[in-house]
Amino acid sequence: MKIAFRIAFRHLGFKHQGSFTSFASLAAMVGLGLGICALILTASVLNGFEDTISRKIAGFDGHIRVQHFLFKPMVPFQTKLDSILTASNSSFS
């Protein structure tokens, strides 16, 4: 770990103030820092936006929708349930 800090501080030192490498190194570090900040900001904004949209869609329409597969009106479930229960009782007798 000490060698990593030694190399980092060597590049941050800028011994040659007028050289192109010091300017390029500084520009690269600033660009990298700005890019990382923009990435973190964008990710957090989109995460919040996704949560908001998900809540609005779930509030507008339920998580599940039950419908007939041919889009016909559905028979009330209680009468259908009664017919299933009577049919299964008679077939197992």
Image (cartoon, rainbow, N blue to C red):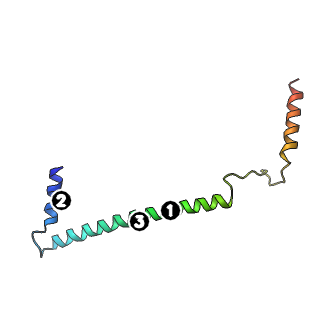
Separation of marks 2 and 1 at Cα, in angstroms: 36 Å
Separation of marks 3 and 2 at Cα, in angstroms: 26 Å
- Position of residue 57 relative to residue 77, above or below, is below
Residue type, label 1 = Gly
In terms of image quadrants, where is residue 52?
bottom right
Say what secondary structure mark 3 lies in. Answer: helix
Say what secondary structure mark 2 lies in. Answer: helix
Name the residue that disc number 2 marks.
8
Separation of marks 1 and 3 at Cα, in angstroms: 11 Å
Name the residue that disc number 1 marks.
48
Check the picture and name the quadrant holding the C terminus.
top right
Question: Which x, y percent locates residue 41?
Answer: 41, 65
Name the residue that disc number 3 marks.
41
Q: Residues within 10 Å of mark 3 (few under 14, many from 20)?
A: few
Instruction: Please state the total of marks drawn on the protein image.
Output: 3
- Position of residue 73 relative to residue 92, above or below, is below
Horizontal relation, residue 20 to residue 41: left or right: left
Horizontal relation, residue 92 to residue 49: left or right: right
Residue, x 85% and y 48% (percent of image)?
Answer: 76
Q: Nearer the viewer, residue 46 or 18?
A: 46
Question: Which x, y percent locates residue 49?
Answer: 52, 64
Residue type, label 3 = Leu
Q: Nearer the viewer, residue 35 or 21?
A: 35
User: Is there a contact, CB below 8 Å, between mark 2 and mark 1?
Assistant: no
Residue, x 43% and y 65% (percent of image)?
Answer: 42
| Extreme residue toward the bottom, this view | 18
The mark that comes first in sequence, 1 or 3, is 3
